[in-house]
Amino acid sequence: MKEAILQAGEDLIRLLDYQDEDVRKLVKKGLTLYRQGYVYNLKELEHYIGVVVYDEQEQMVLLNLNDLSGSECGCQHPSFCAHRLAGFFYAYATKGLVGNLLDKWKEQSLSSQITSSLDAFRVQKSAAPKSEKFSYSVQEWMPFFEQRYEQFAKTKLTRNTSLYPELYEDFFKGLTKEAPSPSPYRELFIIHAGLAAFRKICDGLNKTPLSKQTFNTFVRTPLSQLLYDIEQRIYTISQTSLPFSADDLLYETMDQIRTLLFYSSPLQYERIELYRTIWSHLLKRPKWLKEEKLALQEINGFQLECDVALSHLLVLEKRDDQAVAVVNQSDQAIFPYTFKWAKDHISHKNEQQARIWVTYMNKRMKAYLRTLPSYQGSRAIVSMLLSLFEGYSDLRRDQTIYTEALRQLLPYSFVEYSQYLYEKRQLRAWLELQAAFRYDILEYDRSILKDIETENPKWLLPIYHQSVQQLIEKKTRSSYEEAVQHLKELKRLYKKLQDEQGFTTYMQQLVQSTKRLRALQEALKKGKLVHD
C-alpha cells in the first residue's frame, strides 16, 4: 500500500497545473481541511482508500490509487475537488511527507514552465481587429470555430495524446478570448466554443481509440475541465434575465445540442449530460419541449440516448409518470441516468415526483447491480443510491426506506450501514454486522470498543474469544503475545461482569486444549495468566 500511495502522489502532481490559480486555491483548501483535522475514518482496500471529509457536511471520498482521476466524492464535482485532495493528503501523510510532495510539485512546475517557453506556437487572437458589430448567430460561429481549429491543427500532431490537453488549453481558451463582450452573448459564444472543442475530442477518440488507462491519463482531466467550464456558463445564463434578442441563439442551440447527443463517439455519458443540462437551464419552454419530442421521433438508432432525452423532456413537463413508463421499457443501462431526476425532485422538495423515481430504483437496483462487472463499480452506484434514499427519507421524515435500502444493498452498503448503526447507538446490531462480514472489531478505534463496553460489556466477550482463537491458530510468538493481551482484556471484562469463575473455567479449558503449544504456554506464564 505504501508504494501505491507514493506513486499516486507522483501521479497527482502531474495532474495538477501549478500555474493555474484556481488549482492552487483548490490545493490550499484541501490542505486546510486535512491540517485542521476534518478528515477521518481512513479505510484501505486493495488499491482503494476511503475517507470521510467534513466540509459543512460529511463527504464520502473514495480514492482510486491506480487512477486518481477516477476517484469519487459525495459532492459530485466533475473534477478533482478539495475533498478528494484533503483525503489524499491525509492518506499520503501515513506513508510520506506531504510538504515534500508539494515542494516537488512546485519544482516540477518551474521546470515545465521553462520548457513551455520554448514552444513555437500557441493559438492567438486573430491579427485582424474585431469588427465592432459581432455576429450573434450560431450558424456563423460554427465556420469561425472550424477556421480557428484548422489554424490550431496545423502545428499539432492530431493523432498524439497531447492533442487533448491542448484542445482545452489552446483551442478552447483561445476561442474564449474572442468572445463578444456583452452578456449573455459572451456566455452563449463560449458554450458553443466548448461544444466545438468537445466534438473535436470525440473526433480524436473515434480516429484513435484509447485504452482506459491512456484515456484517464491524457483525456479525463482536460475533458472534465471543459465540461465544467461549459456548465458554469450555462448556470450563469440561467440566473439572468435574457433579452428577446437572445431567443434566436437559444433556438439554434436546440439543433446543435441534439446533433451532439447523437454524435458517434465513446463519450455517451458526457453527451447525454450536456443535453440534459442545456435543456434544464436554457431551453425548457413548452413550445420548444413539444417540438423537440417530435424531433426525437425521427431519430433512428441511439436508443439509450433517445430514451433518456425523451424521459428528461417529460420530467421538465412535470410528467414523471410518463417518463418512468419510458424508462421501464428501456435497457437496464438507463438505470443510473434516473438518479438526476430523483436528486432534483428531492432538492426541490417535490415529494410526490421523487417517490416515483425512488419506487422505480427500489424495484430495479438489484437487477442493475448484477450487470456490473466489478465490485468497485457496484460500490460507486450504491453510494449514490444511498445518498438519494437518505435525502428522500429526510424529506419524508421517515427513515424506513433508507434503513431498508442499507440492508438490501449489502455487502456494497457495509460502510454506510456500519456508520448508521453506530451513530444511532444500535451497537448490538453493529457488532452482529461486523461479525457477519468477518471484520476484526478489535482493530477499530479504541473509543468504539469503549462505547460498546459502556452499553453492555457482555457483547464484547464473544469478540475477544474469537480473536484469541484466531491468534492462537497462527502459531507464531507474536500472535501468542497478542493473544495474551486480549486474554487480559477478557479477564477484566469478566471481573466487571462479576463472573470471575467464568474466566477461570475458560482459561482451564484453553490451557488444556493448547498444552502441546509450548510457546503459548510460556507466553501465558509470562503474562501471569497461568501459574506453575
Image: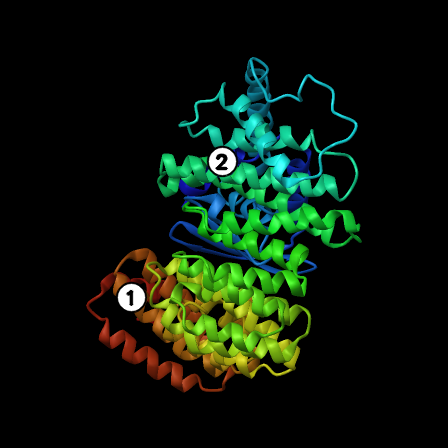
Percent x, y of residue 314: 57, 69
**Quarter-of-image position of residue 40:** bottom right
Can residue 87 be seen here? The reply is yes
What residue do we see at 43% from left, 74% from top? 328
Q: Work out whether 201 lies above or below 473.
A: above
Question: Which mark, by number, is residue 472?
Answer: 1
- Which disc number belongs to residue 301? none
Residue at image location 50% in from the left, 23% down from the top: 153
The residue closer to the viewer here, 122 or 318, is 318
| Residue 102 falls left or right of residue 240 | left
Placement of 233 over or under 178, stated as above or below: below
Image quarter in which the C terminus is found: bottom left
What's the amino acid at mark 2?
Answer: Lys
Of the residues under marks 2 and 1, which one precedes in the sequence? Answer: 2
Report crowding for label 2: few under 14, some 14 to 19, many 20 or more residues within 10 A (C-alpha).
Answer: some
Viewer-closest of 302 and 365: 302
Q: Mark 2 points at which residue?
A: 200
Q: Compare residues 118 and 511 and report the one nearer the observer.
A: 118
Q: Which type of secondary structure does the marked residue at label 2 adopt?
A: helix
User: What is the spatial separation of the Cα atoms under label 2 and label 1, in whole angstroms?
Assistant: 63 Å
Q: Is mark 1 on a helix, strand or loop?
A: helix
Q: Label 1: how many residues lie within 10 Å, few (<14), some (14-19) or many (20+)?
A: many
Mark 2 and mark 1 residues within 8 Å of each other at the beta carbon:
no
Residue drawn at x 56%, y 51% is 274
Residue 7 at x, y = what percent? 44, 37
**x, y percent for residue 426:** 54, 80
